[in-house]
Image (cartoon, rainbow, N blue to C red):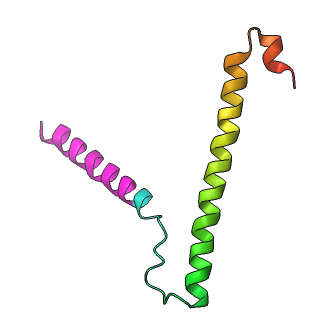
Amino acid sequence: MFNYLYKIIITFLFSIVIISNSYSNEIDCSKFEKLSAKFIECNAKKLKEKINDDINENELTKKLKKFKNSKTLSDLGKN
């Protein structure tokens, strides 16, 4: 009983650590002065990541639409 409970607690703690690390990847530019080069560079990185995410989503949606519109397997393989 104790061993089973121990495994559940370890798994729960491990998952919380993983989830918290994924949310901490957000870049915080507020620690720099507004007109400094570091602040501008930080905002440029954030914007670049946002644009890349949007582009990847658009490519995925294009492929999904192509898959949904294909009536046969040969239609899916074209283009």
Q: Main secondary structure of the magenta part?
A: helix
Q: Residue at x 70, y 33 (%)?
A: 62
Q: Residue at x 55, y 90 (%)?
A: 35
Q: In the drawing, does residue 57 fall left or right of residue 16? A: right
User: Which residue is nearer to you in this view: 7 or 13?
Assistant: 13
Q: Residue furthest left?
A: 1
User: Which residue is nearer to you in this view: 30 or 6?
Assistant: 30
Q: Is residue 30 magenta?
A: no
Locate residue 17, reporting x and y percent.
34, 57
Name the quadrant of the N terminus. top left
Q: Residue furthest top?
A: 72
Q: Is residue 9 magenta?
A: yes
User: Which residue is nearer to you in this view: 43 or 8?
Assistant: 43
Q: Residue at x 58, y 86 (%)?
A: 38
Name the quadrant of the C terminus. top right
Locate residue 25, reporting x and y percent.
47, 64
67 is higher (above) or lower (below) than 53: above
30 is higher (above) or lower (below) than 56: below
Locate residue 55, reporting x and y percent.
68, 48
4 is higher (above) or lower (below) than 35: above
Q: Residue furthest right?
A: 79
User: Which residue is nearer to you in this view: 19 or 73?
Assistant: 73
Q: Which residues are magenta?
A: 1-20
Q: In the drawing, does residue 43 fall left or right of residue 77? A: left
Locate residue 39, reporting x and y percent.
55, 83
